[in-house]
Image: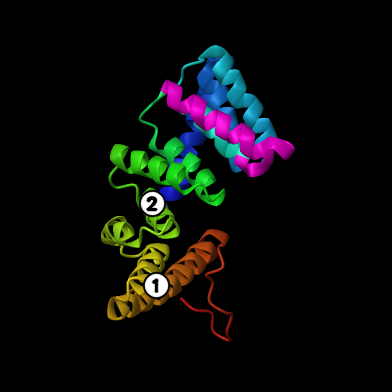
Amino acid sequence: LASHLYSDLATQASQRLLATAPGSYQAHQLNAEVLEIQGKPGEAADEYRKVLSLRPNLPGIHYHLGELMLAGAGGASSVDEARKEFEEELKIDPQSAPSEYELGEMARQARQWDEAIGRFHRATDIDPNFVDALIGLGKSLVSAGRTREAVAPLERAVHLQPGNPNAHYQLSFAYRRLGRDQEAARELAAYKETHEKQQSSSLRIRKGIQGNIAQPQTETPPD
């Protein structure tokens, strides 16, 4: 009910905005967000670029463009284009933890451990509760052979999000590398439990959204 209520309010506000200020940067940003939800990254990127033409230093827009490049809006050069957008975002907003995180992930996937560690460190310095960045930092430290240093950020990730399966799995892996087998087994068991709960929860949410919650028809319909 809350989901439908807020969706209706958002629709009404959007219609008022488009009617009163169709050429505003806010209208283009709204269009971009809608197109993004609809799975149209190329068209969404065009709208975000219109926002930048009106407000070149608006925080968050280059970050969104970077995300769209990673989604394929940049074609064959998507990763390079995304990197440029995240770097541009940091010029406008040096406190953009998500941009640091994405650049860290790119470096990690390229096996550039020192850069990845530096990026993830900066992301967690900006936002100490950024769980994905803590996990990325832990994974990069393990890959760089600095497993003992990886334990602290991974333990913090588990503390912040005890229901996060990936945090438990990565901490289990780090413990195993250090020969802490009992703790590794505990975290592996937590990973399996949280993973099953996550899958079950996702299934229930999907069924609820799709309306697949009706009871089967019987001879006497349920009340």
Whether 47 is drawn above or below 122: the answer is above
Whether 96 is drawn above or below 115: the answer is above
CB within 8 Å, label 2 to label 1: no
Decide which of 122, 96 is in the foreground and name it. 122
Decide which of 159, 34 is in the foreground and name it. 159
Residue 49 % position (x, y):
61, 22
Tell me which numbered mark, 2 or 1, is placed earlier along the sequence.
2
User: Is residue 61 in view from this perspective?
Assistant: no
Q: Residues within 10 Å of mark 1 (few under 14, many from 20)?
A: many
Q: Which residue is mark 2?
A: 137
Say which amino acid is labelled 1. Tyr
Q: Which residue is mark 1?
A: 191
Residue drawn where x is 45% and y is 36% of the image: 99
Image disc number at residue 76? none
Residue drawn where x is 44% and y is 27% of the image: 90
Q: Which residues are magenta?
A: 70-92
Residue 83 % position (x, y):
56, 34
Where disc 1 sits, the SS reads helix
Where disc 2 sits, the SS reads helix
Decide which of 199, 31 is in the foreground and name it. 199
